Image (spheres, grey):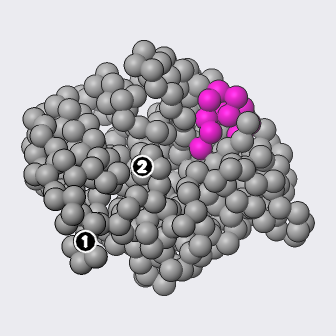
Amino acid sequence: MAVKILWYLTTPDGPYPWEPEGRWATDFEHLKQIAVASDRLGYYGSLLGSSPNESLAVSAALIDATKRLRFLVAQHPGELSPAVLAKWALTFDQFSNGRLLFNVVNGNDAGLATLGVHYPHDERYDFSLEYWRAFQGFYAGDTSGFDGQYVKLAPRSPGAARHPLGGWHPPKQKPGIPLWGAGTSGPGVAHSVQLLDVYLSFANTPPKLGEKFRKVAAEAAKIGRELTFGTRLQIIVRETEEEAWAHAEKLLQRTSLQTARTAIERQLPAGQTLESFHSDDPQIQRNVDAIRAGHLPKARDLEIYPNVWLGPSLFGFNILGPAAGTYLVGSAEQVAERIREYEAQGTSAFILSGFPLIDEAHRVADLLFPLLELDHGFEVPRLGVGTPVPPRVATVEPA
């Protein structure tokens, strides 16, 4: 068994960028530095996070600055014609030697409407499935077009498709671009098991995340498919447990009470307020009571499982339960043990982040990589040791 470790690539950065005073002014050169560091440190890939920048443009601009790093690019169906996206992907893969991954994002009603996609929740998944099927066919070199309920693309002349001026590149990745993504509702799971290669979920405790993944795997098995599974985590890893929790406490104390209150209010059930909310979980209730009383809990009060922490992050302060901001906190040995526990529960890909992004990328590679078996498709350098991790078979065909 082995795991893939990806890092995060986004414009917001700094020691604690969820607060204005902890956020740096960054630019493209800073993004490039993060990508180059992730590439040289041996990360499998980078998730291009939400920012004012278009992820397709950012990833393309970073091809020449990197050699092995794969780019996991979020893409909403309908933003571009699937044929245009396929030609874009073929070009990207030709220039990068097959380093593109897509994160299939189906979004929400309001967000998609601004992009020109106006389907109800359940129907969005039907549209998305057609969209990505059309994309996959065009990427693979199919010239017969696509005639679906939502997507209709005219055939291309096979001769024109191979013409040196107007033709398209042949596919670099076989059988196609790996599709990563998520979906928790009934229609979302049905869509995922038909389409995705890697099913993603925000983190929870290892047993609860494993339970979710097993349910999705069972649905995939009903139609003869197997998926791999990944999760998204923040991380604080240090040489000792004490150092890690001291840093967690430092981040917590630099977080404003207003940030905590706003985060809780976003998570409350409809019709509830911070004052009216009550949780049957005594730990959650104690932490909510602390916020009501005008002070933040202590860091250890937010640990819901060994080394699993619900502290503040750029992605939320998930006091009411695990979500996008969930952390792993501990010594390298403890964090490695927890990753192996997640792996035993079915997780094989971990998208990690810590701030500042370059500093924490180095810490993770230095302290954690030597303790894990990594499935990155190339030799991963061990900083300060000089012994590479044994290589595994690459998933991308050589040029």
Instruction: Report if the CB atoms under discs 1 and 2 are less than 8 Å apart.
Output: no
Q: Amino acid at mark 2?
A: Gly
Q: What amino acid type should be assigned to the residue bearing mark 1?
A: His
SS class, disc 2: loop
Can you see residue 221? yes
**Which residue in the protein does label 2 denote?**
176
The residue depicted at 38 percent of the width and 62 percent of the height is 170
In the visual, does 234 lie left or right of 88?
right
Relative side of 181 to 210, left or right: left
Location of residue 71 in the rendering, given as x and y in whole percent from the top left corner: 48, 62
Q: Is residue 153 above or below residue 251?
A: above
- Is 104 within the magenta? no
Camera-near label (1 vs 2) is 1
Q: Callout 1: few (<14), some (14-19), or many (20+) C-alpha neighbours within 10 Å?
A: few
Horizontal side, residue 388 vs residue 393: left or right: right
Could you say which quadrant of the image residue 349 lies in?
A: top right
Look at the image and say whether residue 344 sits in the magenta stretch: yes
Q: Mark 2 packing: few (<14 Cα in 10 Å), some, or many (20+)?
A: some
Q: Residue 163's spot in the image, x, y percent? A: 25, 71
| Numbered range of the magenta stretch | 338-349
For residue 107, side relative to residue 284 (left or right):
left
Q: Is residue 107 visible?
A: no
Secondary-structure class at tag 1? loop
Question: 368 or 385: nearer the eye?
Answer: 385
* Residue positioned 47% across, 55% down in the render: 173
Q: Which residue is at the front of the view, 326 or 189?
A: 189
- Rendering coords of residue 127 (x, y %): 18, 38
Disc on the earlier residue, 1 or 2: 1
The residue at the point 72 percent across, 41 percent down is 2
Q: CA distance from mark 1 to mark 2?
A: 22 Å
Residue drawn at x 13%, y 37% is: 148
Please give the residue where the numbered disc 1 appears in the rendered image.
Answer: 163
